[in-house]
Amino acid sequence: MREKLIDMPRRMVAGFLALAALGVVIGVVALADGPPRPLAANAPAGEFSAARALGHLGRIAAEPRPIGSPASARARDYLVGRLRAEGFGVEVQRAVGASSSKGLATFGRVENVVARLPGSGSTGTILLAAHYDSAAMGPGASDDGAAVAAILETARALREHGPLRNDVVLLLSDGEEDGVLGAEAFVRQHPIGRAKGVLLNFEARGAGGPALMFETTPDNAGLVGAFADAAPRPHGDSSMVELYRMLPNNTDFTPLSEAGFRGMNFAWIQRGSHYHTATDSIANLDKGSLQHHGATMLALTRELGNRDLADLDGEGDATYFRLPGMMVTYPGALVPVLTVLSVLAFGGLVVAVRKRRLAGLPSILIAAVSAVLPLLLAAVLAQVLWSVLAGVRPGYDTMGGLVHRPVPYRAAVAALAGLALLLWYVPLRRRLGPAALAVGALAWPAGLGVLLTWVAPGAAFLCVLPALACALGGLGAVLLPRGRFAALLAGPVVAALLLPVWAQAAFDGMGLALAGVPALALALFGMTLVPFGELVLPERRPALALPAALALAVVLTVTGLAADTYDETRPRRTHLAYVLNADSGTAHWVSGDADPGPWTRRYASGRDQAALPPGYARNLRWTGPAQPARAAGPRVRILSRDGDTLRMRVTAGSGARSVTLRFDRPIVEASAAVQGAGAPARVAVEGTRPKTWPGEVRFRGLPAGGASITVRVPGGRRLTAIAETTGLTAVPGFVPPPRDLVPSTREDGDLTAVTRTYDLR
């Protein structure tokens, strides 16, 4: 029994027409996935206008504004003035924020802007949140200036129709880029931060794309319903929620939700090569993305602002995803029901195929077990492609795989996924038969649907719905007297609506460095196409498809290398820093680049790290001698020592905004305080820092008067203090880079560092 699941006259024509129809479906989904058209400045006063918001963005995102910088202070003052002009009660919360990770305690003096608009009969608080600081490497027009500008425009629009029922609070936080410091201080010290309510947080990880609702708090059904009903062109899906809950990433949403706020987190993620770089500018911002952010923000604020917030409680998690023109939602209780139906439909298809003598049970079983191979091979080939690209163009590794022009490379990954499927299908086609392979391939969407229902139910729809549709379509193709082709095509149509767009989002979010993840999704999609792939394969020499797929992948890769060149708007990246040892008076250039370009090599071309200050080196590959600069450097004064606990007064020196303390032993607890910033912040610390001294304390936005820092460091013998000043222009002998080269996203790059080492014994 080696029959086809379906056959017909002019089989190749029919097969290509089916594949073309699926291509149209994918294209329609892609076109519907973009952001809306931005509204002009003369749009109705009650609507959100990206043009009006851009006026605010130009005032706050013309330059980098890291925590504690003069640019940050100017942005803060502008925000306070605008919100007061709109009738909000405004305060600036000055506090010390804190966070911890392995071996590291981070503190910062933050200045959160908190604005409140009382409701007419409040049932709770609607908290709109975005951070007004930026990474030091760029002006942060997208991350997160656009969301801040959108909040200002939303604040104006809200005043057009009188007060809402519920209180509206705007939190424009400080210090997010250095460890969500402002949000942490807000929930720990501000009364509103402990009042709970509904949170709408807005972020960006790129320079464009639709605003995705990618994270929620648990029991999100009520929130998802409000989002689907009120948001214009809602985007995102519940698989993102499941994935984000598993990852260590965090935004301001994390401390705010942990403090008891229910809520939703939004971000756009396309054009990620601009993220945290000098090109995250207003010129590169997609204005439609700003419109989508703001229109979503305004609509949800109005919707939730007039609801009884108690109605949002305790309905479990919902599954949600977008189809062209609509948002599909259904309750979590329906997930296992659909999963069971998909398994039953698959089992019914197996029985029907066997009874019609299209394939035997052993052949189907072998096909199902062996079908894991193309899934794994697709992921492996995608990662091999990435290794080749990073080897040919080392700068891609510095970019984390978020390249400027990724489309040809993504198409190459799709071609490699097709190659993986062909390497499985062609050798087994004559031995097992096309029908056995077509049915066996569906075991994986069905089986993965069962697994996801168990571990990540919000993501189960990605496998369960294609498996159910393909199994039912297969049953129709086997059992119906007519309309068999259309029935069989229905299953891949459902898969085409879901899996390619998910792969696109995975490419956007993870980059080519993790291309194996979208490749896996594309291979899974390819498994639903097996019956139609059979129709277009040459009858006599099907193996010709193998070199054709490989050649296509090669051509697309070469096209990508030719197209993705560097220029001023799409620059290369490099890591370079200057470190001065104030104890010895010696200075060095350092770089962590794998393969530095000519400009970087003029400063750092050696490998000797022995002369660097004790405890300074971390993930560095290159060094070079430098002219010593005149700098005061950091000062650490030990105020007291009680066993393993050190109490210190730390200053960074003139011009430095941050200080890092590295200890030669792990730290277990740290606290910090500055004058005029409220109570001290304290964190426990576990683990050790990798590839450097094991304990570290950072203070960002350090005022000129310094900070009081207390650290418990059992057995600590030495401490190196590193004062950090953004930029290298004041360093003797420094020549600015060419215009197509910008600092990388490493936090210790484009810095002037001055060190002093202290004996703690």
Image (cartoon, grey):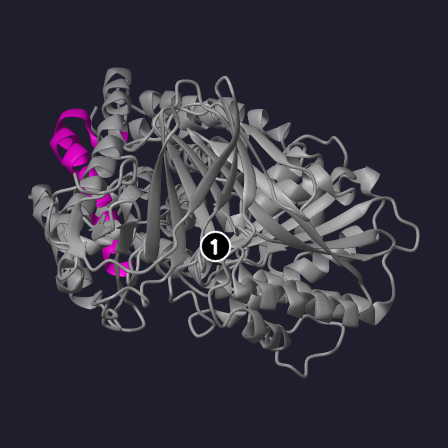
| Residue 436, x across and y down, in percent | 26, 27
Indicate the quadrant containing the C terminus: top left, top right, bottom left or bottom right: top left
Q: Residue at x 39, y 27 (%)?
A: 760
Query: In this orientation, which residue lies closer to the viewer: 603 or 135?
Result: 603
* Residue 441 quadrant: top left
Q: Is residue 423 magenta?
A: yes
Q: Residue at x 83, y 38 (%)?
A: 310
Q: Is residue 684 visible?
A: yes
Q: Decide: is 370 above or below 275.
A: above
Q: Is residue 755 magenta?
A: no
Q: Decide: is 324 above or below 424.
A: below
* Residue 423 quadrant: top left
Query: In this orientation, which residue lies closer to the viewer: 316 or 546?
Result: 316
Q: Is residue 489 visible?
A: no
**In the rendered view, does 62 fall on the left or right side of 723?**
right
| Residue 516, x across and y down, in percent | 28, 39
Question: SS for tag 1?
Answer: loop
Query: In this orientation, which residue lies closer to the viewer: 745 or 471?
Result: 745
Magenta stretch: dominant secondary structure: helix
| Residue 30, x across and y down, in percent | 43, 59
Query: In this orientation, which residue lies closer to the viewer: 234 or 53?
Result: 53
**Which region is colored magenta?**
406-435
Q: Residues within 10 Å of mark 1 (few under 14, many from 20)?
A: many
Indicate the quadrant containing the N terminus: top left, top right, bottom left or bottom right: top left
How many circles with numbers are drawn on the protein?
A: 1
Residue at the disc numbered 1: 657
**In the rendered view, does 334 fall on the left or right side of 20?**
right
Q: Decide: is 223 above or below 670.
A: below
Q: Residue at x 70, y 61 (%)?
A: 298
**In the rendered view, does 396 fall on the left or right side of 175?**
left
Q: Residue at x 20, y 46 (%)?
A: 386
| Residue 662, x across and y down, in percent | 38, 35
